[in-house]
Amino acid sequence: MRLNKYLAAAGLASRRSSESLIQEGRVTINGHVMRDLSTVVDTEIDQVEVDGRPVYVKTKDVYILLHKPLNYVTTVKDEKGRDSVVDLVKTGERIYPVGRLDYDTTGLLILTNDGELAYRLAHPRYGVEKTYIARLNKKINDHDLQQLRRGVQLVDGKTAPCRARKLGKEIVELAIHEGKNKQVKRMFRKLGFKVVDLHRAAYGSLQLGKLKYGQWRNLKPVEVLGLKKLVGLID
Ligand code: URA
């Protein structure tokens, strides 16, 4: 793709003002200033920068399933300089995590460059079920489980009815459809528990399978279709 077309496709400027950027020497490819308007960019390999900032053109949709390890942030940049999940996944594309998992939460995380799907998956309106396994600091009884299922009053509203079942004396599987900030930990805290470990085991029908901590794979086309169906992007 020609350089001026590339800059326009990246949403940076119209084709004409892209030409000005190039002629002014503000555009580099792999660190070299390019003033030739007919320069061709290899979108798979070349790193294009304008005024020292990387510029990306989305060439294909990418959908990744990652087993998030402990001690990674799910933001692209972290002001404390902590490691980001984005650095665990090597694709030529610029991808973003769908929703958040806490630094100390492990488990299933989707990353994609498909903005519309990411938006819908993370939006409570589409009600995608997220299944968590929480290990607590003490035993839980049936009454507490019932309260979780019915909904718990948090500062930002009551949680919607959800599924909760005991997997062990101190271990609960909780399946929620919302995405309030730190929702699972806050629900348990409200009932007097501390979550010692939190793991996301499933997202809709997606599960981690054999992926180990830090491992990832591309979603299969049928899995992507399933997600799109779930949030009404296709029939
Ligand atoms: N709920 C939480 O409290 N933490 C997470 O990381 C995800 C859901």
Image (cartoon, grey):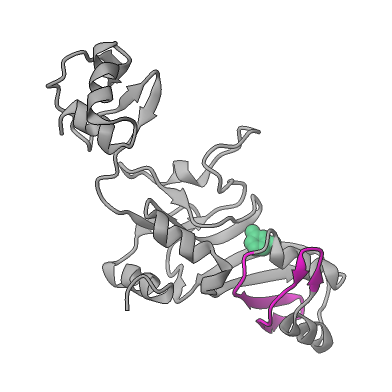
Residue found farthest to the left: 38
Q: Nearer the viewer, residue 102 or 106?
A: 102
How far across and down, in percent of the image, does residue 86 sit? Answer: 46, 44
Looking at the image, residue 126 sits to the left or right of residue 227; the answer is right
Q: Is residue 193 visible?
A: no
Q: Nearer the viewer, residue 115 or 97?
A: 115
How far across and down, in percent of the image, does residue 112 sit? Answer: 40, 54
Image quarter (top left, top right, bottom left or bottom right) of the N terminus:
top left
Compared with residue 32, is residue 109 higher up or lower down, i.e. above or below? below
Q: Is residue 38 visible?
A: yes
The total number of labels drawn is 0
How far across and down, in percent of the image, does residue 108 sit? Answer: 51, 63
- Which residue is depicted at the point 64% across and 49% down? 103
Q: Nearer the viewer, residue 149 or 215?
A: 149
* Residue 169 drawn in magenta: yes
Residue found farthest to the right: 192
- Which residue is depicted at the point 62% across and 47% down? 71
Compared with residue 33, is residue 230 higher up or lower down, i.e. above or below? below
Looking at the image, residue 32 sits to the left or right of residue 96; the answer is left
Image quarter (top left, top right, bottom left or bottom right) of the C terminus:
bottom left
Looking at the image, residue 212 sits to the left or right of residue 170; the answer is left
Q: Tell me which corner region of the image, top left, top right, bottom left or bottom right, holds residue 106.
A: bottom right
- Which residue is depicted at the point 46% across and 67% down? 208
What's drawn in magenta, residue-wise? 153-179
Q: Quadrant of ligand 1?
A: bottom right
- Which residue is depicted at the point 72% across and 84% down? 149
How far across and down, in percent of the image, does residue 127 sit? Answer: 54, 74
